[in-house]
Amino acid sequence: MNTLTLLEKALGKGRVKQNETLARFTTLKIGGPAEFFFLATTCAEVVKGVKVALEVRIPYYVLGGGSNIVVSDKGLKGLVIRNESRNITIVKRLGKVKNGRMVISQALVEVDTGVLVNQLVRFTCDEGLAGLERHLGLPGTVGGALYMNSKWTKPPTYVGDVLSSAKVLDREGNTKVVDRKYFDFAYDQSILQKTHETVLSATFLLTLSDKKVLWETAQSSMDYRRATQPMGVATAGCTFRNIPLSHALRLATPNNTTSAGFLVDQVGLKNFQIGQAKFSDKHANFILNLGGATASQVKGLIDEAKKRVREKFQVEIKPEIVLLGEFK
């Protein structure tokens, strides 16, 4: 049997597509075709997709919301699994007995990693559960947010801060439950970037709070994003990771800012354009697709920024967005 037949035998007749263009599944709206494409609507289907890819010995990729990635113009070989598992459940409410009655103070919320971060934030605010409200407006899914340990900077808060445990699928197709420590979270980092494992579901420990206050906090974060970042345009999100404070002190940046966008701006690349890809004139750490941009043009902007910042500041800026597939 050929590869398509083997995949369909495991995943269902007609469920596997060939040469599916990936651009529409990314926030940058760029990307060539997937050799094979499968849309998974449950965690079990994600597992099934990974396992059959391992069995037929082809590469696989699990995509969520498609933010923070640039897919090669040549596309991706193997099986691309689009994770659209969308369950959210309050699995347990926690508290203490006071004056003879239970007073609830926390809750454990289990969420599939195909859930959009915005969907999860809105759910928790509506339930009066604090811990994720500052992430309103964060693009992508819970899985991607855990992979990058996505952040909000005013004040600094990370998605991983309130993670309790997670169900993880390793590269051999085995599942395991791990706690927060397993992820080794840091700025823009998690263990997943080394292990390339797939998180199937995550359980967050959240604190009971006033719904009105939570929504006000969430809206203030959203308002700040609108004021400082390009909105309503095709972008992958922040292009580069911020620099360490030690570099900022050495360079004597204004207010010791660690902003990679500041450095990109200082080397004259704000509004700089290659083809239909350009650095935003609103925030230099965002690359925009003006319509018809290619992955190679985006890669050209990334390389130009790294080169100019290295020459002017003797600093290596590291991409935050992930390049998938073959690039020159």
Image (tube, rainbow, N blue to C red):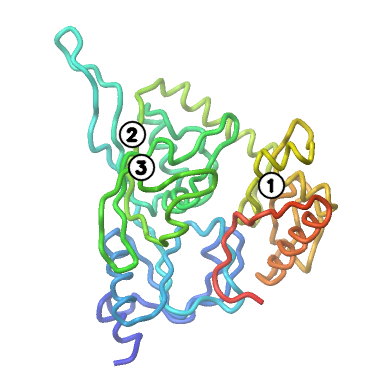
- Which amino acid, mark 3? Arg
The circle drawn on residue 205 is 2
Q: Is residue 49 left or right of residue 238?
A: left
Q: How far from the left and from the top, in percent, is residue 80? A: 43, 71
First in sequence: mark 2 or mark 3?
3
The circle drawn on residue 230 is 1
- Which amino acid, mark 2? Leu
The reply to whether discs 2 and 3 touch (Cβ–Cβ < 8 Å) is no
First in sequence: mark 1 or mark 3?
3
The reply to whether discs 1 and 3 touch (Cβ–Cβ < 8 Å) is no
Q: Nearer the viewer, residue 311 or 192?
A: 311
Q: How far apart are the two marked residues, 1 and 3, measured between alpha carbons?
A: 32 Å
Q: The C terminus appears in which quarter of the rendering?
A: bottom right
Query: Which residue is found at the position 38% from the left and 67% from the top?
Result: 39
Q: Tag 3: Cα neighbours inside 10 Å, few (<14), some, or many (≥20)? A: some
Judged from the image, the secondary structure of the residue bearing numbered disc 1 is loop
The residue carrying mark 3 is 180
Mark 2 or 3: the one toward you: 3
Q: Exactly how many numbered labels are in the figure?
A: 3
First in sequence: mark 2 or mark 1?
2
- Which amino acid, mark 1? Pro
Q: How far from the left and from the top, in percent, is residue 29? A: 60, 64
Judged from the image, the secondary structure of the residue bearing numbered disc 2 is strand
Query: Which residue is found at the position 39% from the left and 22% from the top?
Result: 209
Q: Tag 1: Cα neighbours inside 10 Å, few (<14), some, or many (≥20)? A: some
Find residue 46 and report its image quarter.
bottom left
Q: Is residue 149 left or right of residue 314?
A: left
Q: The N terminus appears in which quarter of the rendering?
A: bottom left
